[in-house]
Amino acid sequence: MSVAVHILGTAQDGGFPHAGCGCASCERARREPALARRVSCIGIIGASGRCLMVDATPDFGAQQAALAAAAGRTPPHVDALILTHAHIGHYLGLALLGREAMSARAVPVHCTPSMRRFLEQNRPWAHLVERDEIDLHTLRPGEALEFDGARIHAFLTPHRSEDTDTIGLEIEGPTRRLVYISDADVFPPALAERVLEADIALIDGTFYARDELPHREILAVRHPFVNESVERFAGARGDVAFIHLNHSNALLSEHAPALPKGFRVAAEGESFRL
Ligand SMILES: [Zn+2]
Ligand SMILES: [Zn+2]
Ligand SMILES: [Zn+2]
């Protein structure tokens, strides 16, 4: 059996509809729940059916169930997690592994040294460590993790680091490589090279264009712009799918602009065999 990557969520940290937002896109997604999107997350099902989830989002319960369903296992549980960074959309779901919910037993959680320190030194996360509900493993940028037939390489991405650094992942199966970069302020040349060379690239598509939020806000939370990324990655050897979309992104609006051939918005439920 090969390795498969499943898309479990495609929205920016605040979800879609976005908490507290009354914009036309969010109101439309409230009226039509089929348009709602869970927070960005992927799951890996290994060669023997073991499940690893990348990030524990506020939608962790539903995403864990979706991954388990794809792997045909009940009750839903994951065998391991990798956390990319400490922004709310990427780790809050860990709380569900604790005593108030799953009372998990030593679920392996792989993360960078700064993310590890953050979890060990701050409650409620430290409770999970002390009670052995999660078992932290250091995954340094530049290192790779072997998981059930997949080789998962971690690399640093430039992203505002209030509490921790941020990693992206390259997931290598027996025949293909997928790159996952949910959060990057920009794509420096080394990162762009990974996107161009991947068989499938799932990349930060938070904002569609430079003018969709007031200038000050766009500067405070930097992300690449979809309308610039499609030009930059026009020569990519594989498909490029945008993930981590903010509610303000034109691609989520009623009159979404079309994307050039080879580019699309990532869809929850799609999977890639590697
Ligand atoms: Zn994020
Ligand atoms: Zn909105
Ligand atoms: Zn972030």
Image (cartoon, rainbow, N blue to C red):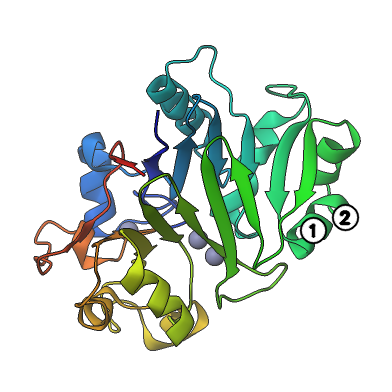
Q: Residue furthest top?
A: 74
Horizontal and vertical percent position of residue 228: 25, 82
Residue plotted at (83% across, 59% down): 117
As drawn, 95 above or below 10: above
Horizontal and vertical percent position of residue 96: 66, 31
* Amino acid type at mark 1: Phe
Horizontal and vertical percent position of residue 104: 73, 24
Q: Nearer the viewer, residue 34 or 41?
A: 41
Q: Secondary structure at mark 1?
A: helix
Q: Residue furthest front?
A: 174
> Label 2: which residue?
121
* Tag 1 and tag 2, C-beta contact below 8 Å: yes
Residue 124 appears in the rendering:
no
Residue plotted at (9% across, 61% down): 255
For residue 118, which numbered disc appears in the image? 1
Where's the N terminus, which quadrant? Answer: top left
As drawn, 149 above or below 49: below
Q: Secondary structure at mark 2?
A: helix
Label 1, label 2: how many angstroms apart (C-alpha)?
A: 5 Å
Residue plotted at (28% across, 78% down): 229
Q: Kindly indicate the quadrant of the structure image that contains residue 262.
A: bottom left
Q: Kindly indicate the quadrant of the structure image that contains residue 29.
A: top left
Q: Residues within 10 Å of mark 1 (few under 14, many from 20)?
A: some
For residue 184, which numbered disc appears in the image? none
As drawn, 134 above or below 86: above
Q: Residues within 10 Å of mark 2 (few under 14, many from 20)?
A: few
* Figure quadrant, ligand 2: bottom left
* Amino acid type at mark 2: Gln
Report if the beta carbon of the residue with label 2 is closer than 8 angstroms to ligand 3: no
Q: Residue furthest right?
A: 130
Q: As drawn, is 4 to the left or to the right of 74? A: left
